[in-house]
Image (tube, grey):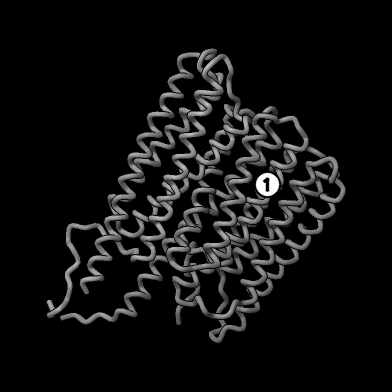
Amino acid sequence: MAAGAIAWPKDEELGSLGLKGLRMTLSLCYANFLLYLVLYITGMYINIYITSGVSTISIGNTLNVFHMLIGTLNFAICFIVMTVGFLYGMRRVAIFSLGAVASIIVATIGGLLFLSLGGGRATSSSLTLVGGWTMSALFMLALFLSYYATLKVMRAIRVIEAVSRAR
Amino acid sequence: MSSSNPLAEDTTRASSGAKKLAYLVCLQGAFLAATYFVGIWLTTEVQGAAVTTPEVIEHGIVSSAFAVLTGSVGFLAALQRRRGVALANLVLFAVTLVGGTAGFFFLANNSDPTVISVTNLTMMSAVGFGMPISAYSLATLMGAARGTEHEPMSGVSLMTYMALVSLALTVVAGALTLSAAFYMEAVVIHVGFAALTVSLTLGVLILSVLEGSENRLRTWAPQRITFALLSLASISIAGADGVITIYGGGVSYVVVMAEVGVLAYVFLMVVSGAPIGFRLGRRT
C-alpha cells in the first residue's frame, strides 16, 4: 500500500452508492418513519374510535382510504430502500428491507381480511379479529426491520465521513 | 501491477447502473400493460366490483407493482443524477397514488356516476401518461448505457415519443367516453387522437426505413422496422375494433381494442430502445 493511503474498513458494508446517495436514502428512511407514525395514529383512531363498539368500517371510509394511501407510500419506500440495498451492494439493508416489505404485504392481507369480513370487532367473526391482529403485529415487525435498515445506512454514512475526514 | 483509470471506472459504473435501471423500466412497462388490460377487463366485463372480487384483487396487485416500480425508478434515477427521468417518474408515481385513492373510493360507492368518472379518468391518466414516460426513461437510460446519451435525438425517436403521447391522450379520452355528460366530445377527441396515433406510427415506420437507408453502410435496422410495422398493425386493428364498437356495439371489442392498444405501446417501447431483441444485421 502506498504511504499515506487510508484503508477502507473491511467489515463495514458501505456499498457503492456514495455519500450523497446514502444521505438521500437516509432522508427517505426518515420520511418513512413519519409515515409509520401517521399509519399508527390513523390505525389506532380506527381501532379505538370507530370499530371499538358495534360500528364497522368500510373500504370507502375517508380515514380508511387515507390509512391505505399512507400504507401504499410506506410500502413503496421500503421497496425502494430494498432495491437500493440490492443494487448498490448493501446486503443487510436489502435483507432487512425485504423483511419489512414481506411484513407489510402480509399485514395488508390481514387488513383486507378485516375489511372484507365485516370491518368491525364486536359484530364480526373471529377471523376478522385474526386479520386485525395480523395487521398490528406485522406493522410492528416492519417498523423494527426498517429501523435496522436505517441504522445500517447511518452506519455507512458515518464510516465514509470518518474515512474522508482522516484523508 | 495493474493500472486503472478512475474516469473509465466511473463511466463503466454509470453505464452499468443505467442498464440495471433500464431493466427495471422494462418491468415497469410490463406491469403498466397488465394494469391497463386487467383494468379494462374489470370495467367492461365485471358488474358490482367489490374488494373481494378476484379481478379487483388482480388489478390491485399489478397496479401496486406498477406504482412501486415507478417510485423506485424515480428515486434510483435521482440517485444516479438523472433529473428528467427522476422528475417524470416521481410525478407519475404521485398520479398513480391519486388513481389508487380514487379506486378505493370507487369500491365503496360503485354506482355513483361522478365517482366512476373520476376513477376512470385518474386511473387512465396514470396509465396513459405512464406510456410516454416509461418510453422516455427507457430511451434515456439505454442511451446512457450505450454511451450515446448526449447525441441529438433522431427523427424516429422524436416521432415515437409523439406517437406515445398521442396514444396516451387517446386512452384518456377513451376513459371519458364512459361519462354520459361528455360522451360526444370524448368520442370525437378519442377518434381524433387515435387517427393521429396511427399516422405517427406510420411515420415511425417510414422514418425507420429512411434512417436505415441513409446509413453509411447501407444496412437497415431490421429490428426497428419490424417492431414499427407490428406497432402499426396493432394500432390499426385497435382502430378497426373501435369502428366496430361504435357501429355494432358490444363491450368485447373494447377489451380487444385495449389489448391490441397495449401491444402497440409495447412495440413502440421496443422501437424507442428497449434492450430486447437480436442482432439481425451482419457486421462488416
Image coords of residue B118 (percent x, y): 72, 42
Image coords of residue A59 (percent x, y): 60, 29
Depicted B211 relative to depicted B142: above or below = below
**Residue located at (69% from left, 73% from top):** B206
**Residue bearing mark 1:** B122
Q: Chain of mark 1?
A: B
Secondary structure beneath disc 1?
helix
**Residue located at (21% from left, 58% from top):** A12
Left or right of A143: which side holds B112?
A: right
- Of all residues, the one furthest to the bottom in this rendering is B216
Left or right of A141: which side holds B121?
A: right
Depicted B174 relative to depicted B45: above or below = below
Image coords of residue B187 (percent x, y): 83, 50
| Quadrant position of the C terminus of chain A in the picture | bottom left
User: Which amino acid type is shown beneath numbered disc 1?
Assistant: Thr
Depicted A55 relative to depicted B56: above or below = above
Front residue of B52 and A160: A160
**Residue located at (12% from left, 76% from top):** A1
Which of the 4 image quarters holds residue B5? bottom left
Front residue of B253 and A99: A99
Mark 1 burial class by Cα count in 10 Å: few <14, some 14-19, many 20+: many
**Residue located at (32% from left, 48% from top):** A149
Image coords of residue B122 (percent x, y): 68, 47
Left or right of B243: which side holds B96?
A: left
Which of the 4 image quarters holds residue B59? top right
Front residue of A15 and A136: A136
Q: Number of labelled discs?
A: 1
